[in-house]
Amino acid sequence: MNKAVTKVVIALVILGLWIGSVLTASANVTKLAIIPFKVNADRDLTFLQKGIVDMLSSRLSRPGAVEVIDQRTVSSLLETITDEISEEVAREIGNRLGAEQVLFGSITAIGDAVSVDTRIVDVQAVEAARPFFVQADTMGEVIPKINRLTDDINHQVFGLEMRADTTKPAAPSPATSYRSHPEKLLTQQKQAAPSPAVSQSPFIASGEKSASGGGAFIQPIQPQAGVFWRSPTFNMHMNGLALGDVDGDGRNETVVITDHQIHMYRHEGGQFIKISESKKDRNRYFIGVDIADINANGRPEIFVTALDVRKSGVQSQVLESDGATYDIVVKKSPWYYRVSTSPGKDPVLLGQEPRQEGPYKSAVYELEWNGTDYESKGQLVPARKANALGSTVGDLRNDGGMTVAAFSASDTIQIFDDSGQLLNTSSDGYGGNMLAVNLPVSEPGGLPPIRYLPLRLIINDLNGDGQNELVVVKNKELTGKHLERFRNFTKAQIVGLSWDGTGMAEVWQTRELTGRVADYAVADLEGDGRQDLVLILVSKEGKIVATNPKANIIAYPLK
C-alpha cells in the first residue's frame, strides 16, 4: 500500500471515529420542551410568564447534554391543543415534539409574593411527574429563586452540576434595553419594587377606612410579613382542614378531608409530605373536620362531619390517630361537629342534630364526653337560628365572658350572649360555601332542593392588638348568590370583625385572593412556634365533566 492510500485510510478512520462520537453524543442529548406557564393572578403578568420561560430555557440548555426545543416550535404546536395541560397532555405534546422530557407548571401571585410551581414529566415513563417549587417574597427575588429551581432540576433530573454563572445575576445598566434578555426584564421589575423595609404583606390591605366605620384596615402584622408558604397544587376536592398534634410528637399535622377520604400531611423542610390516608368511604360525604382532645385521654380526636350517601342525613365519625393508623372512637354519629377555639379558653365541642327540614332547624349545643359518646351539655343557640359548622364561642366582646357568633341561613352573622339572646345581626353577608345538604323532594321525580352549609368562624387576635376579632371568610360570587344550583366564586378575602358595643364592624381585611377559600385555621403549621393562618384556596372547582379540581394549601405567618 502506497503512502497516499495509507493517508486516505487513516483519514477515513479518523472521520468515522469522529462521526461515531458525534452520533453517540447526539444520542445522549435529552430534548426538553418547556410549555408556557399558567398564570394565576389578579393582574397582567405576561412579562413574568415569558421571562421565567426564557430563563428556564437558557439555564436548562446544556450543549451535549440537554437541548431545549425552540419556543416558537412549542407555541405553534400548542395552538392545536385545546385541552388543559395535564401530565397526559404534556406527554402527548412531548411525543409530537420528539422530546424526552416536558416541563410545565403555573405562576401564582398573591400581593407582592410570587410562587412558581413546576412539574417535569418523562414522556416515555409511567411514573408521575416530578414537582419542583419555589416562592419569592417580592417580584425582585424571582431571579435568584429561578436560579435555584434550575439548579435543582439540573441536578435531580439530568444529573448535572450547578452552573457557576447562575448564582449572582448582574444588574443591568439604566441604558440597557429590557427587551433583549428576560433576566434584565425581571431585574427592571425588581428596581421598581418597594424596599424590603416598607414592603407590605400580600395578605393585608392597609391605609384605607372601613366602609362599616370600624376604623382603619389592618396594618402589616410585622414589618416583613410578606412571606407566605404555598403547597403544590392538588387535583382533588378539598372540603376542609384542621391542624393538631395527632401523633403526640410535639408538632402539628394537617388533616385534610376530600369527598370520601381523610388525608394527613406533615410540613417538613418546606415540603408538604403525605404521611397517611384513610380508605375511601363511598357511603359518606365528608364536609367538615376538627381536632381537639375533648375526651381528655391525652390523644386529640379527629371529628369528621359527614353526610350519608344521599347527602340528606348526617353520619359523622370520630377518630384518633398515631399518624399512620386510625382508631374509631365513634363510628356513626348523628351530630354536626365543630370545635370552637378562643385565646385563653379551652376548646369547646359544638354539636347539632339534623332535621329533615334543613341543617339550620335544630338548636346548637355544647357537647361533652360521657365515657362512651358525646352528649349535650347545654344549649348555645336556639333552634332555627344557625348550624354548628358555622358557629363559634369565645371572648368575642373582650369582657372575659363567652359570646356566640353564628352564620344564619342567609350568610349574615349573628351574635348571641351566653343565654342565647340575639344581640346583633350583620347587615352584610359573608361566607360562601359549595357544600350543601339535599332536602326532601317536593314533587315525585324532581330534583331535591338544596341548602348550603355555612363556613367556619374563628375567634382570635390576628392583628396583635390585644383584642379578639371574629375572623371570617368572604367569598365573592359571580352570580351574586341568586342561582340555587350554580355558584361560581372568583375572589376571596379574610375579614376581621370587632365588637363595638352594639354590633360587629370590619376593622381589617386581607387583599383579595383569586379563587375560593374552602376552609381555614389558625395554628402552627411549620413547627417554628409561630401561629399561621392556614387556608385551602380552590382555583378550579372541577365540577364540569372531564375537568380536574385544583386547590392549594396556603399559610401566612402571624405575629
Image (tube, helix red, strand yellow):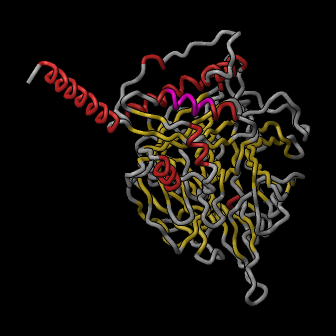
Tell me the quadrant of the picture where the C terminus can be found: top right
- Rendering quarter of residue 145: top right
Tell me the quadrant of the picture where the N terminus can be found: top left
Q: What residue sits 42% from the left and 54% below the top?
A: 276
- Which segment did they paint magenta? 51-58
- Compared across the picture, whether 331 is left or right of 29 comes to right
- Relative to residue 396, is residue 14 depicted above or below? above
Residue 372 in sight in this render: no
Main secondary-structure element of the magenta-colored stretch: helix
Location of residue 94 in the rendering, given as x and y in whole percent from the top left corner: 48, 48
- Relative to residue 542, is residue 167 depicted above or below? above
Closer to the camera in the image, 17 or 438: 17
- Residue 185: in magenta span: no
Location of residue 424 in the rendering, given as x and y in whole percent from the top left corner: 87, 53
Location of residue 101 in the rendering, given as x and y in whole percent from the top left corner: 43, 43
Q: What residue sits 66% from the left and 9% below the top?
A: 173
Closer to the camera in the image, 192 or 378: 192
